[in-house]
Amino acid sequence: MRNFIRFFSGRYPIGLVLLTVLSQTLLAEPRGTGDLGLVVERATGSLTAINTTSRRAVGKITGLGDLSHASLVYSPDERYAFVFGRDGALTKVDVLENKIVKRVEQAHNSVGGAISQDGRLIATSNYDPGGVRVFSAETLEKVADIKAEYGEGQLARVVGLVDAPGQKFVFSLFEAGEIWTADLHDPKNPKIQKFKAGKEPYDALISPEGRYYIAGLFGEDGLALLDLWNPDAGIRKIVPEYAKDDPKLPVFKMPHLEGRALIGDYWFLPAVGHHELLVIDRREWKVVRKIALDGQPVFVIPRPDERQIWVNFALPDNDRLDVIDTRDLAVVRRLMPGKAVLHMEFTPKGQEVWVSARDDDRVLVYDTENFRELARLPADKPSGIFFTSRAHRLGL
């Protein structure tokens, strides 16, 4: 190939540029996406691209607007990320080329989104105007607008939006106190089912196999459970009085239920406004144990092999991480990564965890077996960390 290019470029100068591009394309080393990820830099509206094998930053994408509550999902081939900005923008990013492919201003205030089971549709979860909007993953053209109407034409803020089997999205309406499912087999004509959930659902999760959707209730004790295998049974209230005898504490940060920890027959969920972790038996949906913590938990994330659970905290304890051993359900290690620990992300097989420390402008990498720090990377006010392996999991 090099001799071919040298021969023609010497005799045909007009084609030199074309041949140079051709040579670079053909001689470029193939690159996969499986060990890549993105770190949200909330203060600058940018993303830092990272490689988990080399533990280093490999690129920067700028111009994404308000990322103060940003999240993202990946296409099935891990090539593209779809970023949901707080300013209502939806941005498609090329993970290999570290560039914006397309950006649309789809709402005024948005808090997340999801990608459909087949990877063809992107749904956004909106505060203003309330509702869910659905876009083509290929072009970002809008294909559906699901208005979260309740009462006398009011629009509810939408939270807890997740993808589900059967080409569905499931989400909660905060003011309406409802959970809706939307079947998108025909994207232009979504089939909606509505369920009364309880007072002020604020966040939600879906179980790894896609059966159970659980919404936390801010306006009352307990959780709302929808069995997607048996939706006709409606909503079931679970653990309604888990904290009835405990003193009420101010909630400094709402916990994120999508940091789900389901291990065997037990769910591990953060208790809203309390310094404890709830252990719920999902056969009877009752609290069977409470694990005392030194702060209000925000994310409760299991290591992929389920041997550990890692927990971060709201103010004033957001400079630490607790590691819980799932054999004896006790805190076995406390780490102090830095100021304002916002997020954790495990490598797919769990040997490492990446941690963002926003107010120290850094991302740290720990060995999850011996808790040794392996690397630290500079980042500008980092928050969410998202690896491409999320492309193959429901609800993330």
Image (cartoon, rainbow, N blue to C red):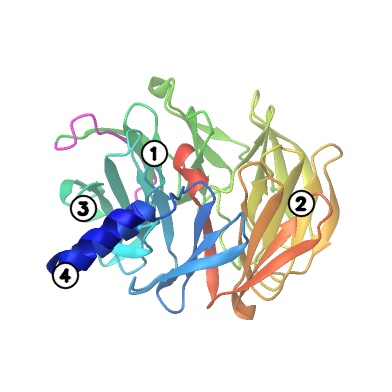
Q: Which comes before the other along the chain, label 1 or label 4?
A: 4
Residue under circle 3? 140
Label 4 crowding class (10 Å Cα cut-off): few <14, some 14-19, many 20+? Answer: few
Q: Horizontal and vertical percent for residue 267?
A: 66, 36
Label 3, label 2: how far apart the Cα atoms are = 39 Å
Which amino acid, mark 2?
A: Thr
Q: Horizontal and vertical percent for residue 180?
A: 34, 38
Q: Secondary structure at mark 2?
A: loop
Q: Horizontal and vertical percent for residue 96?
A: 40, 56
Q: Secondary structure at mark 1?
A: strand
Horizontal side, residue 53 vs residue 391: left or right: right
Which amino acid, mark 4?
A: Pro
- Is residue 315 in view? yes
Q: Which comes before the other along the chain, label 3 or label 4?
A: 4
Instruction: Check if mark 3's residue and mark 1's residue have beta carbons within 8 Å.
Output: no
Residue mark closest to the camera, 3 vs 4: 4
What is the magenta range? 175-188
Label 2 crowding class (10 Å Cα cut-off): few <14, some 14-19, many 20+? Answer: some
Residue under circle 1? 163
Residue mark closest to the camera, 1 vs 4: 4
Label 3 crowding class (10 Å Cα cut-off): few <14, some 14-19, many 20+? Answer: some
